[in-house]
Amino acid sequence: MQSIQKYGLQVSIALVLVLVIYVLFIQASFTEPSLTPTPEQKVMTQSKIGKLIQSKGVLGMGIAQKILFKGTEYDALIINLEEANIQLYYKKSSGKRFENFGNLKNYLQNKGQQLIFATNAGIFEPGFQPEGLYVENGVELRPLNLKKGKGNFYLQPNGVFFLTNYKTANIISSEQYPNVKKVVKFATQSGPLLVMDGKINPQFSAKSKSRYIRNGVGLIHKNQIVILISNQAVSLHEFARVFKEFYQCPKALYLDGAISEMYLPVFKRYESKGNFGAMIGIVK
């Protein structure tokens, strides 16, 4: 009788252990993902929302992606700011503008550097001066522009994309800039903001007929950004949706449209004959 009771107790203990292991397994399966996913994690999760056509690593600095979202193809570069040597470029020391990616590439080659990526970095005035704030290596070359006006730059709210000395980035409304200017290494002001606090700019209409090739920058988190260009003409509302829904950016800023280009050799994009004001570049 005692042996039967002992056997029953052993079976009960074994069942309890199995139940505990099962509960722990279920909890592990439903653990919330990291709030700051790696580029590789972003590739896997976002492919469920849109269609990921192609993905290539870029020298440990980030991941280039070709995506299809709502019938439109986009090229993107997710950039790891802790690894990438990313800067803004406008003029040579001689005072002459770089003008395009081809000139920037040749300039860097003469310094023993290789251009990995480039895109135009904001709206400019006639004469190719940045329309608003422009900071390069901590030096403010153009002041913050809080004027009212017509055109995309003045569509409110507009904003500032900036990089710090601490390999971090942010996108803020233009009015907020004086609060952060002490930590800024590079900055460009443009407009409008596409996404603010995880919401699409309410000024945009889903029925808008204004459609152009567009480029912009989105914040994934403080050490990771995505720069995106549409390969077909899109509205501002459609463009903003890619940042919000595909890349889950809480903030995104429009850089320019119609003239926008991208230099991304990993996808055989060698555009080099544009005529721009400031440019964003990554060098090796």
Image (tube, grey):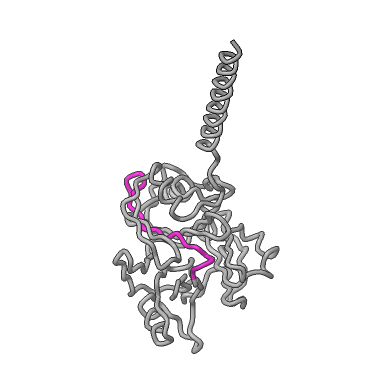
Image quarter in which the N terminus is found: top right
Name the one closer to the observer, 254 or 204: 254
Task: Tell me the residue at 38%/62% (across/down).
Answer: 57
Q: Is residue 213 visible?
A: no
For residue 143, which quarter of the picture?
Answer: bottom right
Give percent across and percent down for residue 2. Answer: 61, 13
Give the side of residue 258 with respect to residue 248, left or right: left
Give the side of residue 102 with respect to residue 140, left or right: left
Give percent across and percent down for residue 197. Answer: 59, 48
Task: Tell me the residue at 36%/69% (across/down).
Answer: 263
Give percent across and percent down for residue 240. Answer: 46, 50
Q: Which residues are magenta?
A: 68-84
Image quarter in which the C terminus is found: bottom left
- In the picture shown, does residue 79 fall above or below 110? above
Q: Is residue 108 visible?
A: yes
Labels in figure, total: 0
Let me know if residue 78 is in the magenta part. Answer: yes
Let me know if residue 77 is in the magenta part. Answer: yes
Residue found at the very far bottom of the displayed protein: 94
Residue found at the very far left of the displayed protein: 268
Give percent across and percent down for residue 48. Answer: 39, 42
Task: Tell me the residue at 47%/58% (across/down).
Answer: 226
Majority secondary structure of magenta residues:
strand
